[in-house]
Image (spheres, rainbow, N blue to C red):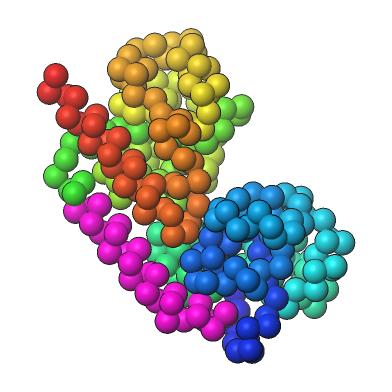
Amino acid sequence: MGSCKQQKKDGGTRYLVLSPEVAEIMAGLGLTPQIVGLTEECTYPAEFASIPKVGKFGLIRKESVFQLEPDIIFTSGLEQDALSAELRKLDYEVISIHPRSLEDMYAGIINIGEVTNTTKRAEQMVAELKAAVAKTQGKAKDMMKPRVYIEINRDPLMSASSDSFVGQVIKAAGGENIFETLERDYARVKPEDVILGAPDIIICYSQDSITNIVNRKGWQNIPAIKNGTIYQESGIDPDLIQRAGPRVVKGIERLHSLFKAWEQNQGE
């Protein structure tokens, strides 16, 4: 998960953060004043608006990186793997944090705390997150579990496996993912497999996606479409369930409330 090298304690370490979830964790640890650059996707918290941006998550302007003269660069995985390797060759200290599960997220927070000399705050954050997740899991333990389809991409059609971070969030909230296993954590799926999965709830990321979903050929008898239990950004902010950071507890709680409302409607 990266180095745990200790940095100077004079508050002068300059951090360049290329991962939105890592940026949110660092803000929660009180490190925003030391962040000298972010990607355009780093939109929360609001104070990030005044911090220089070095490009998009998958398209970083290297000249901007050089100009900011960071001491440590935080990256993610996936399309940033090659960038991380390139930056290390240029003698930058690069810490890659790429949580694939809730446990990975907790470990990542501790790692960030060790690197930034905020270990105690990081440990407190992890303890609070674990307690909040456990509380929702406790409430979800005995409830009916809705079958859930989450559409993370429309063209091509993609969803999340139960082993993925998003899949674990759905489970913690009390849902049952219709795609228990996929070839990767996030992978293409077939429309007919969604139909066979008969989801009670569908989660997507835009109103346009809802319009598209309800008009798909052969999908009209899917329970979620028949009952109108399709949710997008106005019902659940995707950042709350996709980003492995402190706000994920709000995402789990929000999903749980949607699942609970579905359960209550089953008796009608």
Q: Is residue 183 visible?
A: no
Q: Tell me the quarter of the image containing the C terminus.
A: top left
* 14, 245: nearer the viewer: 14
The magenta stretch spans which residues? 113-138
Q: Residue at x 57, y 79 (%)?
A: 116
Taking the image as shown, residue 193 lies to the left or right of residue 43, namely: left
Q: Position of residue 219 (x, y in %)?
A: 42, 14
* 11, 242: nearer the viewer: 11
* 153, 11: nearer the viewer: 11
Q: Tell me the quarter of the image containing the N terminus.
A: bottom right
- Figure quadrant of residue 230: top left
- Residue 238 colored in magenta in the image: no
Q: Is residue 266 above or below residue 115?
A: above
Q: Is residue 86 visible?
A: yes
- Residue 117 colored in magenta in the image: yes
Give the dominant element type of the magenta stretch: helix, strand or loop. helix
Q: Position of residue 124 (x, y in %)?
A: 37, 74
Q: Residue at x 74, y 56 (%)?
A: 53
- Figure quadrant of residue 156: top right
Q: Position of residue 52 (x, y in %)?
A: 74, 59
Taking the image as shown, residue 188 lies to the left or right of residue 120, namely: right
Q: Residue at x 24, y 29 (%)?
A: 262
The image shows a total of numbered marks equal to 0
Q: Is residue 26 above or below residue 222?
A: below
Taking the image as shown, residue 187 lies to the left or right of residue 54, namely: left
Q: Is residue 226 above or below residue 22?
A: above
Q: Position of residue 170 (x, y in %)?
A: 35, 44
Q: Residue at x 46, y 81 (%)?
A: 119
